[in-house]
C-alpha cells in the first residue's frame, strides 16, 4: 500500500475506501489503530502502515441512552439507544467504534468476547457523505 503520513486524516480516507488501517511499531511490535506517528509504548518513530482484516472480539461496550445533540439529531434517544465499544482485533490492536446489530435496549444480552466483523456505516457530516467505522456480530 502507498505510505501517506501516519495520521487520523489518512486513516479516515482509508475508512472511506472500506479499509481499516493502523500502524505497527518496528521497534517493539505494538499496534495502533488509528495509526500514530510515534509509538506510545516505546516512543519510537519507526512505525509502518498495516492493514487489518476487520475481525475481532468485543472487549468493552456501553449503550448510550442519553445521546449528545449530534446523535439526538439522528434519532437516538432513551427509546432508541445506540452502542459504542472497543474491539480487540485478530490482527492485533484495539479500536473504538459503533457496535451495530446488537439489542441496545437490552445491554445485558451483549457479551464481552463476542466475535465481531467490520461494518462501515454511511454517514453524512457537514453535508458530505462519509463512512463511519462500526462492527457487528460475526
Ligand atoms: Zn514501540
Image (tube, helix red, strand yellow):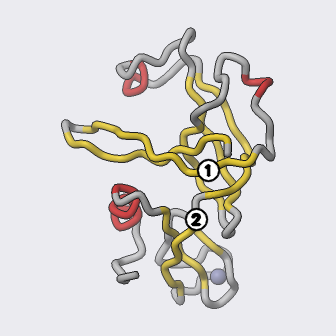
Rendered-image quarter of ligand 1 = bottom right
Residue 100 shown left or right of residue 102 in the figure: left
Which residue occupies 49% across, 67% down? 21
Q: Is residue 137 above or below residue 101?
A: below
Q: Does the numbered disc 1 mark a residue whose Cβ is under 8 Å from ligand 1?
A: no
The residue carrying pointer 2 sits among few (fewer than 14), some (14 to 19) or many (20 or more) residues within 10 Å by Cα, namely some
Residue 117, label in figure: 1
Q: Is residue 29 above or below residue 10?
A: below
- 134 or 9: which is nearer to us? 134
Q: Earlier in the sequence, mark 1 or mark 2?
A: 2
Residue 53, label in figure: 2
Q: Is residue 54 above or below residue 73?
A: below
Question: Residue 44: image x %, image y %?
Answer: 58, 86
Which residue occupies 69% across, 56% down? 56
Label 2: state its secondary structure. Answer: loop
- 75 or 55: which is nearer to us? 55
The Cα–Cα distance between marks 1 and 2, rounded to whole angstroms, is 9 Å
Question: Residue 24: image x %, image y %?
Answer: 59, 79
Label 1: state its secondary structure. Answer: strand
Residue 19 shown left or right of residue 93 in the figure: left
Amino acid at each position: 500500500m502507498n505510505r501517506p503520513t501516519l495520521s487520523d486524516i489518512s486513516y479516515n480516507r482509508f475508512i472511506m475506501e472500506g479499509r481499516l488501517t493502523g500502524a505497527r511499531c518496528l521497534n517493539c511490535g505494538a499496534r495502533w489503530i488509528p495509526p500514530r506517528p510515534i509509538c506510545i509504548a516505546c516512543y519510537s518513530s519507526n512505525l509502518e502502515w498495516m492493514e487489518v482484516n476487520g475481525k475481532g472480539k468485543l472487549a468493552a461496550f456501553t449503550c448510550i441512552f442519553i445521546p449528545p445533540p449530534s446523535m439526538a439529531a439522528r434519532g437516538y434517544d432513551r427509546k432508541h439507544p445506540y452502542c459504542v465499544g472497543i474491539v480487540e482485533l485478530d490482527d492485533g490492536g484495539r479500536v473504538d467504534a459503533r457496535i451495530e446489530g446488537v439489542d441496545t435496549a437490552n445491554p445485558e444480552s451483549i457479551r464481552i468476547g463476542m466475535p465481531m466483523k467490520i461494518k462501515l456505516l454511511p454517514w453524512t457530516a457537514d453535508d458530505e457523505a462519509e463512512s463511519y467505522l462500526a462492527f457487528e456480530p460475526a
